[in-house]
Image (cartoon, grey):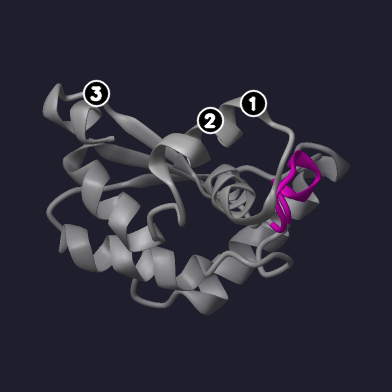
Amino acid sequence: MIRLNKFGIKITFDLSHYSIYSNYLSYGNGNEVADLDRHIYGLPAPSWSRCIDLYGDSLIQLHINDGRGAYASGEGLMLAEGEIPIVSILQYIHDVTKGTRIVQGTIELVEGHLHKGKLQKRAVEWLLANTKDIFQ
């Protein structure tokens, strides 16, 4: 992460992917790459705020979704249906950037494109109701 920022490579931070990865490092097994990461880097994974700090100005986009557990079946959940502190993360990013730059967001839900966008609409309504004064 530090090298990406150093070389100006821009980053999209997918909330549910990171949540699953972080949980996997703590209690998952059977994924060779993540098991190797655990062996090399140890436990636990960096906190949300630490990741955001490490990304620095390279963070330009979020995939906004919820997640649960340590495996792919827990990714891309509707907001507030998993264990990601979405409001706290968005508030932290807002506070860190202090209005000096925009971090774009994409709502990325499993099967979110189905049902004529009703899930995205529900997610947007949840975001607007729970994240006052964060979005421009």
Image quadrant assignment for residue 69: bottom right
What stretch of residues is rendered in magenta? 68-77
Query: Residue lying furthest right in this view?
Result: 115
Query: Which residue is under mark 1?
Result: 32
**CB-based contact (under 8 Å), mark 3 and mark 1:** no
Query: Which residue is under mark 2?
Result: 36
Q: Which is nearer the eye, 76 or 23?
A: 23
- Amino acid carrying mark 2 in the image: Leu
Query: Which residue is under mark 3?
Result: 9
As drawn, 13 above or below 22: above
Q: Is residue 76 magenta?
A: yes
Q: Which is nearer the eye, 128 or 12?
A: 12
Q: Which is nearer the eye, 130 or 23?
A: 23
Q: CA distance from mark 3 to mark 2?
A: 24 Å
**CB-based contact (under 8 Å), mark 1 and mark 2:** yes
The answer to whether residue 44 is left or right of residue 50 is: right
